[in-house]
Amino acid sequence: MEVSVQRDLYGNGKLVKPSDLSLGAQQCKPSTQSTDNMVIFQISLQDCGNTAQMSQDWVVYTTSLTYSPTSSIPIVRTNPAEVPIMCYYYRHSNVSSKAIKPTWLPFSTTVSSEERLSFSLRLMAEDWSGPRSSSVFQLGDILYIEASVDTQNHIGLILFIDRCVATISPDASSSPNYDIITDNGCLVDGMQEDSSATFMTQRVKPDNLRFTVDVFRFLGNDASLIYITCYLRAAAATQVPDSMNKACSYNKATNGWSAVEGPSNICQCCQTTGTCSNPNLMTGGTIRLGRPRAFGKREALDEPHIEGGQSVTTLGPLLVTGPKQSDVALQMTKEESAPVELWVLVAVGCLSLLVVLICGVSIVKSLKKPQNVLSVEQ
């Protein structure tokens, strides 16, 4: 496992000390390969008190990066932090660091590689140019999320997102939870007053679908971690958009729904939750490939379906923090300076009025005094 940590941990230009960073329960220290701007940890998966969990499909190694600021004076100017780190390994793949170079390709391996679809859910940079390097966000940021499916040797496919739900644990059925996408493609989060969530109106490719979500935290919960679990589904590229195969965004300007492709009326069921057709997400609507009759040949079907055309994919954990300290300080300065500025204006106004009154009194007194007339006798 290699973990790279930017010394500008909080993004405020203040570099943390490498000695204040540690990895795992045993507080392993950085490697000697660390640089002036980057702290690097290189450990074995079983080192530093890491824990391993096994599910039906995954082996998950869990650890955490800990930042504990130290100081030679009685104060510190940064907060401690603990960032969870999870490494997922697919149980049915090779997890060795050494490459495997087989000298022959068995028939069963060929069939498996042709029939399995690879789904992914990624955080992207703001310009969609590539994956985002950090999973740490602040309230006010926007999540740029890309879902895709690797078509490999399959027929043309189009990707749909049937549902996305946010939780504070990897279990999508846990509580509390918040639905972002429901009813086979309705981005319902966009209906909230403080949300700008939307699908990108142009797909890069049919097997790719992008959407944005405003960063949030769960009310009344101290946990700053969020997991987003999405139910992804691949359909044949010839699939006609309908109420079950759609990607719909809410438009506040028109108070209505619009579809990424197809007529907008396929989104009408999004207005009332639960009225769209909603088959079993993990069994219905799959695409099934015919098993090859001979090596390197595929059986032709009049109505192609795809087997393994669905996936439950989790994005996270995402660490959500409050606003930047500099932003908070600036806002507090503005709030504190506002009444001061008001009193300054009031004082200047009163002083000006006093000067005017004094001048007026002086002029009136000078006009009432008798004038001395100097007579000159000729």
Image (tube, rainbow, N blue to C red):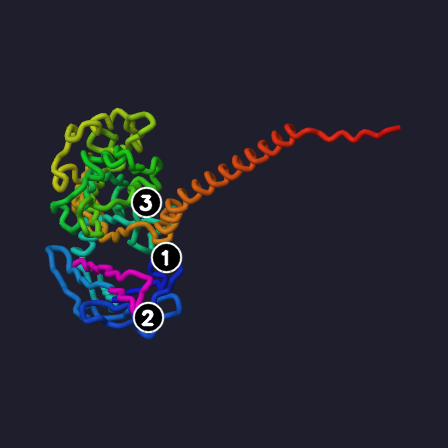
* Separation of residues labelled 1 and 2 (CA atoms): 23 Å
Tell me residue 331's x, y (percent).
37, 47
Query: Disc 1 marks which amino acid?
Result: Gly
Q: Outermost residue toward the bottom?
A: 32
For image coordinates 31% across by 55% down, the residue present is: 134
Q: Outermost residue toward the front?
A: 377
Quarter of the picture containing the C terminus is: top right
The residue to which callout 1 is attached is 11
Q: Is residue 204 left or right of residue 288?
A: right
**Most foreground residue, 313 or 321:** 321
Secondary structure under the numbered disc 3 in the rendered image: loop
Queried whether the magenta region covers residue 23, the answer comes back as no
Q: Quadrant of residue 335?
A: top left
The residue to which callout 2 is attached is 73
Query: Disc 3 marks which amino acid?
Result: Gly
For label 1, count other residues whose C-alpha is less than 10 Å away and answer few (under 14), some (14-19) or many (20+). few
Q: Is residue 52 left or right of residue 258?
A: left
Q: Is residue 136 left or right of residue 169?
A: right
Q: Quadrant of residue 267?
A: top left
Tell me residue 148's x, y (percent).
27, 45
Range of magenta residues: 66-92
Secondary structure under the numbered disc 1 in the rendered image: loop
Nearest to viewer (mark 1 / mark 2): 2
Residue 309 visible to an observer of this rendering:
no
The mark that comes first in sequence, 2 or 3, is 2
Query: Disc 2 marks which amino acid?
Result: Ile
Point out which mark residue 140 bears.
Answer: 3
